[in-house]
Amino acid sequence: MNEFSGDQNFKISNQKVTESCPSNIALIKYWGKYEKQIPANPSISYTLNLCKTNTEMEFVADETFSVQTFLAGKEEVKFAEKIAKYFRSIEEYLPWILKGKYIIKTENTFPHSSGIASSASGFGAIAKCLMTLDQSFSGQTDECFTLKKASFIARLGSGSACRSLYDGLVVWGETKEVYESSDLFAVQYPNDEVHDVFRSFNDWVLLIHEGEKAVSSTVGHGLMNTNPYAERRFQEAHENFATLKKILKQGDMNAFIQLVEHEALTLHAMMMMSEPAFILMQAGTLAVINKIWEFRKETNLPLFFTLDAGANVHLLFPSNKDEDKITEFIIKELVQHTQNNGVVKDMMRF
Ligand code: DP6
């Protein structure tokens, strides 16, 4: 039992709800977890603006429990099985959840098979739909609690999804550096602790490799259990939070760049040091990283990168007077390393 355990007093009815949820990109990475989706270390991400999942959930009350899913209009049986399993696993928190059938229609605003992780926005949108249904069935109307529970429910679907429920900088995982941070749900990083230079940021995603990832995040997290460097990594993530807190307050862009790139490379280093080892970066990823470093050395302009668990490169740069010089460089020098001239231009949500 915890504060999210569901109330047995509910009244179900047929409903159709629609919700939208953005994706997010981690700056301090979540990589490694324990039972029940408890993260091995705290993480912090920027919520994106344009990369979103839109989901329509139709609930037909008092029918035998079943789930049918459509992704961009196409029926997806495997995805439906995954969602049905997920719904069964969260009955304790939403006691009405198995008392009907679901038709779920979902689409992403970013290109299909782009390699951009859709699990964060996807589970975020599903959790929001479930909480809208829950409010209607249980009569519970506390918006703050609903959002917190949506984050809790999203986490049980995919860890990083719990961060997508909030705008701006979002923390998941208990750290003494962030008040009320929790392993169970995400919280917004206090806005007044963030210097203006970090409030308006671009994230252009270079699609180095489109399509399925060679190793799923779930398998990758699992390999941290036997990685001899794991404990040191988890400790470092905690230390990086203390450093980042000062950087965010002071507006120290150079230190921010150093920390964010170090986190991205550490994530991939952990993959390379797993047993069996795996490498998700590709030749294009490395070429782009080297060009970014050369560009910074020559111009001193704040263009830097982060990576998720794949080959794509997230190019981060502030929206300011230097933006045009940076975008010109990206288009002239970096886009050539993508598979199909693929660039998804997004920015942070604040
Ligand atoms: C590298 O949230 O996709 O993007 O909890 O197993 O669904 P599951 O994993 P997932 O892992 C994301 C890992 C990451 C880093 C991050 O987003 O913090």
Image: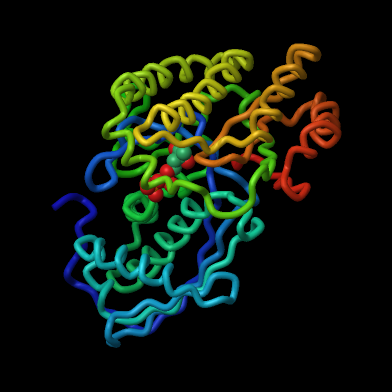
Q: How many labels does the image show?
A: 0
Name the residue rendered at 30%, 33% in the picture: 40
269 displayed left or right of 150: right
Q: Whole-percent x and y of residue 128?
A: 43, 60
Picture layout, residue 53 above or below residue 50: below
173 displayed left or right of 217: left
Its colouring scheme is rainbow
Name the residue rendered at 43%, 19% in the picture: 240
Picture layout, residue 2 above or below residue 306: below
In the picture, the quarter occupied by the C terminus is top right
319 displayed left or right of 57: right
> On the rendering, which quadrant does ligand 1 occupy?
top left
Q: Whole-percent x and y of residue 177?
A: 36, 22
217 or 56, nearer to the observer: 217
Name the residue rendered at 50%, 35% in the picture: 279
336 or 30, nearer to the observer: 336
Q: In which quarter of the image is residue 138?
A: bottom left
37 displayed left or right of 210: left
The residue furthest left is 1
Picture layout, residue 196 above or below residue 335: above
The residue furthest bottom is 63
Q: Whole-percent x and y of residue 43?
A: 41, 32
Q: Whole-percent x and y of residue 315?
A: 67, 33
